[in-house]
């Protein structure tokens, strides 16, 4: 009887232990098929501004790294000062390297991408200057040595821009090598912390070597086990580097917007199993301190 009561208390305890603080979505896309220009949802325009801001607001997402293909979606978010303020969402804009889908597999050797990036940087946004470059993809790590990849990495170091890169572990090393600081000062956010599932020991090695490397955790294979609990080796890694991880939605297709609530609830569930200070860092502080975003007022 006593044991049953204790077990029951444990179950109730874990449900109550959900992380309830603010979230910083450090990997958000607002691509053209979501339709930032539309005012009301329609079959061809399912996620106008009010829709996506509503999803962030009801999930306690108080800041986002915004990037989009093309950059118009980011600009739509950055321009909507009243709406984002009402929703309680701070927009941290990044320049995406993609005007269209063809750019995904060609940007690293196309000099017109550098021009586009420089034009956007000079233009800035109504939510302030761009703070980073990306997300960009390298499906073959050898392309990290492409001329445009080299130029943009040097530019990021020079201008203090963060980088959001969907790449493998080898490409992380190559990209870091192309910066003046050889990666020592380079604030590279590793999208998915390696979507191909780089072993935890390898992530640990790269985090040791590059003190400004961060890991974003969407789609990370092996992060959670069974019913959404953190796997033991990942729990240990998060506790070893509590200042280096970020969460993200990666709304790369519209379907991810449909599951935005579940994605954020999934994060809140495993964040709640960490010591409260570590949960708060991964959920909010690490992104906020990277971009100087103040603590949000409780709502
Ligand atoms: Zn993405």
Image: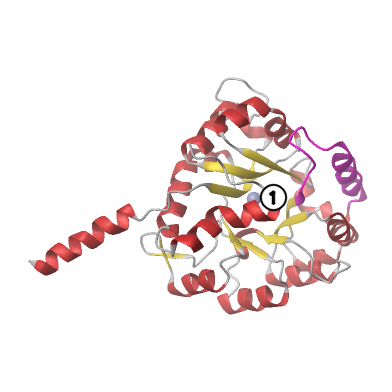
Percent coordinates x, y for residue 230 in the rendering: 43, 65
Foreground pick, 85 / 109? 85
Foreground pick, 185 / 51? 185
**Does any atom of ligand 1 lie closer than 8 Å to the CB of label 1?**
no
The residue at which mark 1 appears reads as: 292
Extreme top residue here?
40
Position above or below: 163 against 296: below
Q: Report if residue 129 lies within the magenta region.
A: yes
Residue 48 visible in the snapshot: no
Foreground pick, 70 / 93? 93
User: SS class of the residue under badge 1?
Assistant: loop
Residue 61 visible in the snapshot: yes
Position above or below: 35 against 157: above
Quadrant containing the N terminus in the rendered view: bottom left
Extreme left residue here?
1
Describe residue 10's horizontal placement relative to residue 84 as left or right. left
Residue at figure coordinates x 64%, y 39% from the top left: 90
Q: Please, which colouring scheme is shown? A: secondary structure
Foreground pick, 280 / 76? 280
Residue at figure coordinates x 44%, y 46% from the top left: 262
Q: Report if residue 113 lies within the magenta region.
A: yes
The residue segment tinted magenta is 110-133
Describe residue 7's horizontal placement relative to residue 55 as left or right. left
Residue at figure coordinates x 53%, y 54% from the top left: 283
Percent coordinates x, y for residue 248 in the rendering: 57, 51
Position above or below: 80 against 178: above
Q: How many marks can you see?
A: 1
Residue at figure coordinates x 57%, y 35% from the top left: 88
Where on the picture, by quarter, is residue 193? Answer: bottom right
Percent coordinates x, y for residue 65 in the rendering: 66, 46
């Amino acid at each position: 009887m006593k044991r049953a009561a204790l077990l029951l208390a444990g179950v109730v305890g874990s449900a109550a232990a959900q992380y309830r603080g603010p979230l910083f979505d450090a990997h958000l896309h607002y691509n053209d098929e979501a339709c930032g220009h539309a005012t009301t949802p329609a079959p061809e325009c399912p996620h106008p501004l009010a829709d996506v801001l509503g999803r962030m607001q009801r999930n306690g997402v108080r800041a986002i790294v915004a990037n989009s293909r093309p950059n118009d979606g980011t600009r739509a978010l950055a321009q909507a000062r009243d709406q984002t303020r009402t929703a309680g969402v701070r927009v941290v804009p990044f320049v995406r390297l993609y005007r269209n889908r063809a750019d995904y597999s060609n940007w690293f050797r196309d000099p017109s991408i550098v021009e586009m990036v420089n034009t956007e940087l000079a233009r800035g946004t109504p939510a302030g200057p761009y703070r980073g470059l990306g997300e960009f993809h390298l499906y073959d790590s050898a392309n990290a040595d492409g001329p445009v990849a080299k130029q943009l990495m040097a530019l990021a170091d020079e201008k203090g821009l963060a980088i959001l890169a969907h790449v493998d572990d080898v490409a992380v090393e190559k990209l870091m090598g192309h910066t003046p600081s050889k990666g020592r000062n380079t604030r590279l956010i590793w999208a998915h912390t390696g979507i191909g599932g780089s072993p935890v020991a390898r992530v640990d090695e790269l985090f040791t070597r590059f003190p400004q490397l961060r890991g974003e955790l969407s789609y990370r294979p092996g992060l959670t086990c069974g019913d959404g609990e953190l796997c033991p080796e990942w729990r240990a890694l998060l506790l070893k580097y509590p200042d280096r991880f970020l969460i993200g939605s990666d709304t790369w297709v519209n379907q991810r917007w449909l599951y935005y609530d579940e994605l954020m609830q999934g994060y809140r569930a495993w964040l709640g199993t960490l010591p409260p200070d570590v949960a708060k860092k991964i959920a909010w502080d690490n992104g906020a301190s990277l971009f100087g975003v103040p603590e949000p007022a409780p709502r």
